[in-house]
Amino acid sequence: MGRRRHPTARQVRLGLELRKLREAAGLKGREAAELLGADSVQMSQIEAGIAGVSEARVRRLAAHYACADEELLAALVAMATDRTQGWWEEYRGSLPTPFLDLSELEYHATFHREVSFLHVPGLLQTEDYARRILGHRVPELPEGELDLRVRHRLARRLILKGDRPIPYETVIHEAALRIRVGDRAAARAQLAHILEFSEAEHITVRVIPFDLDDFAGADSAMVYVGGAMPQLDTVVRDGPHGTAFIDAEAQLGRFRTLFHRMKATSLEPERSRDFIHELAQEV
């Protein structure tokens, strides 16, 4: 298979998981390459996601690595043979790669969890809210690129409202609901939008109120995307230097714990809906 100039996060993840299996088997890259009749450079490219790998090669490597986890093997084969040209491909070359990688992860996700403290989660934003948030960056985006980013953000809702919606659970701090992005009418529209989404059976919205005692979890904002199995989950976090895709098992375990802490801290879904409704009446 040919080399890729810009492998996606999903392709990079496949290579990483193959490398983890090799290292667990105690083999060097050169030894693994010999099993495929390849050289060390080609093996490095496969493990970096730069070069594709066939189903036959994935199975051959797994056999030599003594991988007995059939569920993991099936997931890796699915990743290796996936040729999906998703809706996000129309934005390739026009938007930053992390936007597309997140869309691809969400498309293949088995569930989606989110914790947000300062802004309404992207999947629940109205068009007006999204435009104001995305338009606030410095330097200011050209109007055409801003339009693309807004359209892309709204298109991500496919995982919530498309033909095969996935379970979505979000914990939102009261601060994110009270920070007024736009005027009063826009704020009411945004709160009503969240309430509308929360009526769906596969969507759960929880709120962390300001008056909660002993709350110290404000650094726990995250997007947690479920893979075919827990080992293939991914956490996405935005920082001052860009978007980070986190997939180390120890880190995944940490963020699972943080999410469950935030969930336990928050109001129950029905009380959260009442809370948002009351807040909308105050605006």
Image (spheres, rainbow, N blue to C red):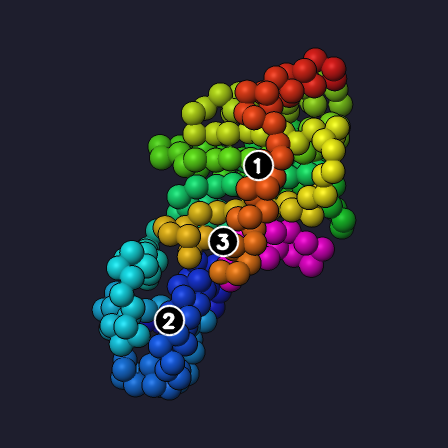
Nearer to the camera, 213 or 137: 213
> In the shown orientation, is residue 254 left or right of residue 25?
right
Q: Amino acid at mark 3?
A: Thr
Residue visible at 27% across and 65% down in the picture:
68
Secondary structure beneath label 2: helix
Question: Mark 1 packing: few (<14 Cα in 10 Å), some, or many (20+)?
Answer: many
Secondary structure beneath label 3: strand
Residue span colored magenta: 234-248
Q: Amino acid at mark 2?
A: Leu
120 falls in the magenta region = no
Asked whether the beta carbons under mark 3 and mark 2 sit within 8 Å of each other, the answer is no
Say which residue label 3 marks: 234
Residue visible at 43% across and 41% down in the picture:
111
Say which residue label 2 marks: 21
| Picture quadrant where residue 214 is located | top right
Asked whether the beta carbons under mark 1 and mark 2 sit within 8 Å of each other, the answer is no
Report the Cα–Cα distance between label 1 and label 3.
19 Å
> In the shown orientation, is residue 191 left or right of residue 252?
right
Nearer to the camera, 150 or 21: 21
Is 202 drawn above or below residue 144 in the view shown?
A: above
Q: Please provide percent x and percent y for residue 207.
A: 63, 29
Say which residue label 1 marks: 263
Is 230 drawn above or below residue 122 in the view shown?
A: below
Is 36 drawn above or below residue 282 in the view shown?
A: below
Residue 212 appears in the picture as rendered = yes
Residue visible at 45% across and 24% down in the picture:
200
Q: Please provide percent x and percent y for residue 262.
A: 61, 39
Q: Quadrant of the N terminus?
A: bottom left
Name which of mark 1 and mark 3 comes first in the sequence: 3
